[in-house]
Image (cartoon, rainbow, N blue to C red):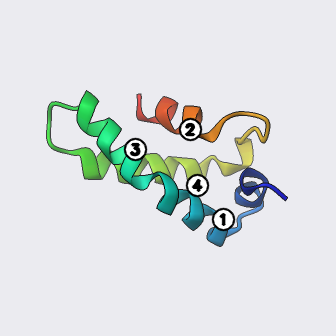
Amino acid sequence: INTIRQIKQGNSKAFKAIFDRYWNIVYRFTGCISWITREGRITQQVFIKLWEKRELLDEEKDLDGLLFTIVR
């Protein structure tokens, strides 16, 4: 079972694995596009939105791209 499928099923351990893997990357990216120092808050909102919309995730799509789309 892939990680996206596990997240869609509400697996919080799979979500934490994604969070741990991508948090720093998303945080740095938000710093590049945000001229207000709210990167931590923006990063938190990205992962909240990912969890809230988990049922809509497409298992065939790239998670990196999805996270950066949410940031924008």
Indicate whether 62 appears above or below 48: above
Instruction: Rate crowding at label 1 as few (under 14), some (14 to 19) or many (20 or more) other CA atoms within 10 Å.
Output: some
Q: Which residue is drawn at 34% across and 37% down?
A: 29
In contact (CB < 8 Å): disc 1 and disc 2? no
Residue 6: horizontal and vertical position, in percent?
A: 76, 60
Q: Which residue is drawn at 58% across and 64% down?
A: 17
Residue at the disc numbered 4:
51
- Which of the two discs, 3 and 1, labels the residue nearer the N terminus? 1
Residue at the disc numbered 3:
26
Residue 64 badge: 2
Q: Which residue is drawn at 72% across and 51% down?
A: 4
What separation in Å lies between label 3 and label 2 (alpha carbons)? 9 Å
Residue at the disc numbered 1:
14
Q: Residue furthest left?
A: 36
| Front position in the image: 33 or 38 | 33
Callout 4, which amino acid? Trp
- Which of the two discs, 3 and 2, labels the residue nearer the N terminus? 3
**Mark toward the viewer: 4 or 2:** 2
Q: What element carries label 1?
A: helix
